Amino acid sequence: MSTTEIAQTTQYLTFKLEEEVFAVDVAKVREILDYTPATKVPGTSDFMQGVINVRGNVVPVVDMRLKFGRSATEKTVNTCIVVLEISVDEDKTVLGALVDSVQEVFEMEFSQIEAAPRIGTRCKAEFIKGIGKRNNELIIILDIDRVFSIGELNVIQECAA
């Protein structure tokens, strides 16, 4: 594999929200945890589930279904918390993303990704890096650094403090 090919291939972690498949760059993933009930923090947004203890660190947990305007995540044996490191400007925030299930990690070449459509998606287009195609399946590739607004991230950071 040439240097150009390496630069155009990225590994993604895929997960499901309802029946749709989403992906995030694995470089943003710290770990995947089994579902743990979160301690609710009063006065936070509906999508903010609360906080959990991850090896002595307080980690805020957000319900990705609620964040994207869907029904709350129903807890099953497959429900997971994907611990992500999000960057906004110079700040890094660690948060847990509650998802229906984690699928797999795989490599996707740049040529397998199309630009995000401007209409017809259930989440805002600025969150989406592109739409990947794999085995006749469409995968929404999220720009996880842009999913949350500065205000939302400030609330999330305050919950972890």
Image: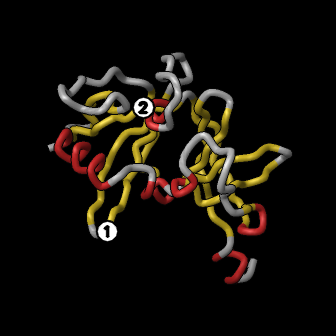
Taking the spot 69% from the left edge, 63% from the top edge, the residue there is: 115
Position of residue 24 in the picture relative to residue 138 (left or right): left
Q: Secondary structure at mark 1?
A: loop
Residue at 19 percent of width and 29 percent of height = 43
Q: Where is residue 100 shown, x and y percent of the image?
A: 55, 27
Measured as percent of width and height from the top left, residue 58 is found at 22, 38
Residue 39 visible in image: yes
Residue closer to the observer: 107 or 148? 148
Q: Residue 19, how many percent across, how many down?
A: 68, 29
- Residue 26 visible? The answer is no
Q: Amino acid at mark 1?
A: Asp
Q: Nearer the viewer, residue 83 or 73?
A: 73
Residue located beneath label 2 in the image: 63
| Quadrant the C terminus occupies | top left
Label 1, on which residue?
Answer: 89
Whether 10 is drawn above or below 39: the answer is below
CA gap between label 2 and label 1 equals 24 Å
Q: Amino acid at mark 2?
A: Asp
Task: Identify the image quadrant of residue 87.
Answer: bottom left
Residue drawn at point x = 44 percent, y = 50 percent: 147
